[in-house]
Amino acid sequence: MTSRGYTTEEGNRLNNFAIEPTMYVDETPKTGFTQHAEQLNGRLAMIGFVSLLALEAFTGQGLIGWLTSL
């Protein structure tokens, strides 16, 4: 008999061992061209593009011109 995080034996003795959780195996692929990876790549590309536009707006030069003038 199992209830409330403890078990009782046949002789109605209490066992204070933890109840094992049910195992769950996630079969979705974590590498390669997954939906999450593509969304992350797209968002990072948008951040980089907007950053380059802001750099050009503030300095009046593009990325290569700004790097060579340092």
Image (spheres, helix red, strand yellow):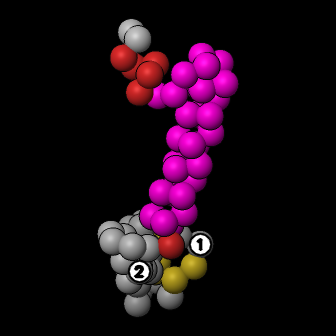
Q: Give the number of the disc on residue 4.
A: 1
Compared to residue 5, the image places residue 58 above or below, namely: above
Magenta span: helix, strand or loop, mainly? helix
Q: Give the number of the disc on residue 28.
A: 2
Which residue is most to the left?
Answer: 31
Say whether residue 3 is left or right of residue 63: right
Compared to residue 50, the image places residue 16 above or below, namely: below
Distance between the alpha carbons at the discs numbered 2 and 1: 33 Å
Q: Position of residue 29 (x, y in %)?
A: 36, 77
Q: Residue at x 40, y 90 (%)?
A: 10
Q: Nearer the viewer, mark 2 or mark 1?
A: 2
Q: Is residue 46 magenta?
A: yes
Say whether residue 21 is visible. yes
Which residue is most to the top?
Answer: 70
Q: Position of residue 22 (x, y in %)?
A: 44, 80
Q: Please, what is the three-letter code of the amino acid marked with disc 2?
A: Thr
Q: Position of residue 30 (x, y in %)?
A: 36, 70
Give the magenta-colored segment's residue range.
36-63
